[in-house]
Image (tube, rainbow, N blue to C red):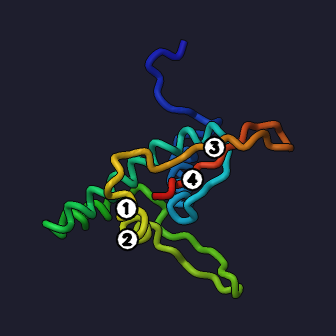
Amino acid sequence: MRHKVHGRRLGRNTKQRKALRRNMVADLICYEKVITTEAKARMLRPLAEKMITLAKRGVIAGKENPASEVHARRLAASRLARFRTYEDEEGYYEDIDVVQKLFNEVAPRYLDRPGGYTRLVKIGKRPGDNADMAALMLVEE
């Protein structure tokens, strides 16, 4: 019986789960939409909500005390994979600082919203192994 057992293992050991969470939350913040299995999306959703809340509190507290925002940025950097590289339309590669995007673009968008920053949409089954797929995305304001 699994009484009081919290979290999902996802068939991985602890380090692999931690790396998966860091990378997928960073991808969600960077691209604002992630398509993955439903189990991973359900595991990812509360973590993404907590990161956005951390950034919101840092932005609000940073107006009075800049050290509070620096502290929140450092906490976010310790919990996220920091940089993402993507190819733009012209074929050039660019690095995105995920923490910077979280604090400068994502958090200010949700300052008036008390929670519920993400939406989980089921999108059917994956053809190869019939796994339930879902899209996790940031809601539009």
Quote the CA–CA distance across marks 2 and 3. 26 Å
Q: Position of residue 100 (x, y in %)?
A: 40, 71
- Which quadrant of the figure has residue 8? top right
Quote the CA–CA distance across marks 3 and 4. 8 Å
* Disc 2 + disc 4, Cβ < 8 Å: no
Which is nearer the N-term, disc 2 or disc 3?
2
Please state which amino acid type lies under the numbered disc 2.
Asn
Which is nearer the N-term, disc 2 or disc 4?
2
* Disc 1 + disc 4, Cβ < 8 Å: no
Which is nearer the N-term, disc 1 or disc 4?
1
Residue tagged 2:
104
Viewed as shown, does residue 77 lie left or right of 131?
left
Residue tagged 3:
121
* Disc 1 + disc 3, Cβ < 8 Å: no
* Disc 3 + disc 4, Cβ < 8 Å: yes
Please state which amino acid type lies under the numbered disc 4.
Met
Q: Is residue 77 visible?
A: no
Viewed as shown, does residue 130 lie left or right of 123?
right
Residue tagged 4:
137
Report crowding for label 1: few under 14, some 14 to 19, many 20 or more residues within 10 A (C-alpha): many
Report crowding for label 3: few under 14, some 14 to 19, many 20 or more residues within 10 A (C-alpha): some
